[in-house]
Amino acid sequence: MIKRVVDFFGDEEYARQRRRLFYLVLVLIAIADFLVSREHAEYLWDRLPGWSAVYGFGSCVLLIFVSKFLGHQGGLMRREDYYD
Amino acid sequence: MTDLIHPGLIFILGALPIPLLSGSIRKAYLLLIPALAILAVLAMQPGSYGEMQFIGQEVLIAKVDKLSIVFATVFTIMALIGTVYALHLPHADQHVAAFVYVGSALGVVFAGDYLTLYLFWEGMAFASAYLVFAQGGRQAVAAGFRYLMVHITGGVALLGGIILHGLATGSLLFGPIEGGMGVGAYLILAGFLLNAAVPPLNAWLTDAYPEATVTGAVFMSAFTTKTAVYVLARAFPGTELLVWLGTAMALYGVIYAVLENDCRRLLAYHIVSQVGYMVAGVGIGTEMAVNGATGHAFAHILYKALLFMGAGAVIYVTGRRKLTELGGLYKTMPMTVALYMVGAFAISAFPFFSGFVTKSMVVAAAGQDHRALVVLALTMASSGTFLHTGLKLPYYMFFGTDQKLEAREPPGNMLVAMGMAAVLCIAIGVFPQMLYALLPYPVDFEPYTGVHVTESLGVLMFTALGFVLFLKALDPENTISLDTDWFYRKGARVFMWIAEKPLARYEKAVSDVSETAALPFLHGAARAGLRIDLTGVDAIVNGVARSILRGGGALRRLQTGVVTHYVLAMIVGVIAAVAVFAVAWR
């Protein structure tokens, strides 16, 4: 059973199903975020449905590119024999 | 020690017979000790134990309250899991070191005064360093030395702080630092922050943990940083500086994790990131925040150990640790993949996993304390956490390009240990009340509200979307990342250059002067001295010298030059000291 689940996420033959499932989940989460009650909103963004999706995506992209920028242009990434 | 069985002593004294046992008797014994320690923690009653006077100072061996019990509970559970994971190891020395390490961590958790705390603090440093040395090889030994050096330096700062603080306040009892922050308090804080791996004092962790043995790294991931969180929560709750250090640390870890190619070093950067939540929680200092920090430490120990066990299993089976050299293992290691993913979901704070009910408590406490920036930064770090431990690492380790590696599932005991941790990660997520009941303050927090669930899923799944879209940008690269260890790794080279070039020249100049000017005078004085010496002193000295020579010969045979022997000797010394201490104390 576990092997089949793991295979589903690895095998090439399920690639299309995987992608469909993934987009379906994204859509469902986005819809659900519009439906839940927001009584205790403390901050402005708490009142915006869909904020978390935008923020999550933005954070991810920002982290990838800022880090890679620091790594390549900022000189943090070095050859493996740097200290030898 | 009226009616308290100190779980730390169970481990430290319990470590002694390990080398004498073998086969399945040893295995049973190894499991018995953590099991006994868990029972000892369960049987504990809050109170003060082992009060006495030592060099004119009040010493309190064990102070038991809710905060120390939570940490002791998870430490002993973790020790059991780690021991199961290491059960196949034939090396008694590594088991001994691990037990002394756990025992020392427990000693810190119950320490009621700074002297006891310091003693166990150093014990932890030496015992854990052994787990790095035990890996063997130039790289590991070098990293182990750096680890030890940094921790000894931190220990000196701590000891200096303890003495100054003791002189200023007249008491060495360990508790919240009251009044103004003096030099002593800052030194103590620095010693604690070093062990919590707060940047810029973080590099020892990411330098050494990936070099440790497969099983040793699992222990290390659990104890050092979390004892530091404990002592911070005890001594410095509500220190504003910690809020910002913790928040910066949470992001620092995830930024470096993007760059990392070594699977366990990537996970080590996530320790830095996750401990950031705890440090920030301690800094906020409200009841909810300290609860959150404590609860998160509890959950973190279990899921981080699970992740280290998963990565360790891959290293154990394939002998490879770089993401650029791994891939396609899901076919041969499905159980490892599944168990690792439980840890990944827990650290990423998916609903029904442990991180969801603890991490959000810290974030919510920051929100209640009107710290919008902290909330945003910690949420961003959560996104990064899932991006690396939940997506990047498993993708390149287990899926991704098939490297056609020969692999199989790791030994059964490793899978069982991972299973134990996985069950706890899910149990805490599904029944958070169990954990909440242990926390130091009453909990008024409901993690499972509709908006919290959808927001968390939104952040996480849209992070996954970013991952899918920008997968190419995340491809691991065959590099290492410069961190603050650069200063002492390159600095040591400058030091050696100064020692070799200018200093050596200076020394030569000085010796030239002494040869031409001072020597004739010294010769005369020496001749006079010789006459006195030959007649009277010689007879006595000769006797003493002969015995020293004999002793020296014996000592020389002990000097093997093998680092692990020395460290082992130090550990034996620590055990002996504790044993003497325990006996004398009764």
Image: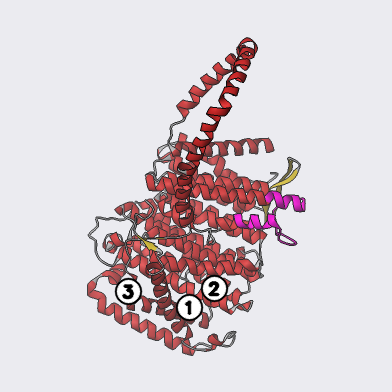
Where does label 3 land, which residue?
A: B471
Instruction: Give the amino acid type for the residue marked by disc 2 in the picture.
Output: Ser
At mark 1, the secondary structure is helix
Where does label 2 land, which residue?
A: B360
Residue B448 or B132: which is nearer the viewer? B132
Which contiguous range is marked in magenta? Answer: B162-191
Disc 2 sits on a residue from what chain? Answer: B
Q: Where is residue B268 in the image (x, y as percent from the top left)?
A: 45, 59
Where B12 falls versus B465 (above or below)?
above
Residue B117 or B551: which is nearer the viewer? B551
Label located before the other in sequence (1 or 2): 2
Where does label 1 land, which residue?
A: B456
Q: Where is residue B529 in the image (x, y as percent from the top left)?
A: 63, 17
Q: Is residue B367 magenta?
A: no
Instruction: Give the amino acid type for the residue marked by disc 1 in the picture.
Output: Ser
B351 sits left or right of A40 in the view: left
| Marks 3 and 2 belong to one chain | yes
| Marks 3 and 1 belong to one chain | yes
Q: Distance between the residues labelled 3 and 2?
A: 28 Å
B563 sits left or right of A14 in the view: right
Label located before the other in sequence (3 or 2): 2
Residue A77 or B499: which is nearer the viewer? B499
Q: How crowded is mark 3: few (under 14 residues within 10 Å), some or many (20 or more)?
A: some
Q: How far apart are marks 3 and 1 (CA)?
A: 22 Å
Instruction: Give the amino acid type for the residue marked by disc 3 in the picture.
Output: Leu
Q: Position of residue B135 (x, y in %)?
A: 40, 46
Q: Distance between the residues labelled 1 and 2?
A: 9 Å
Disc 3 sits on a residue from what chain? Answer: B
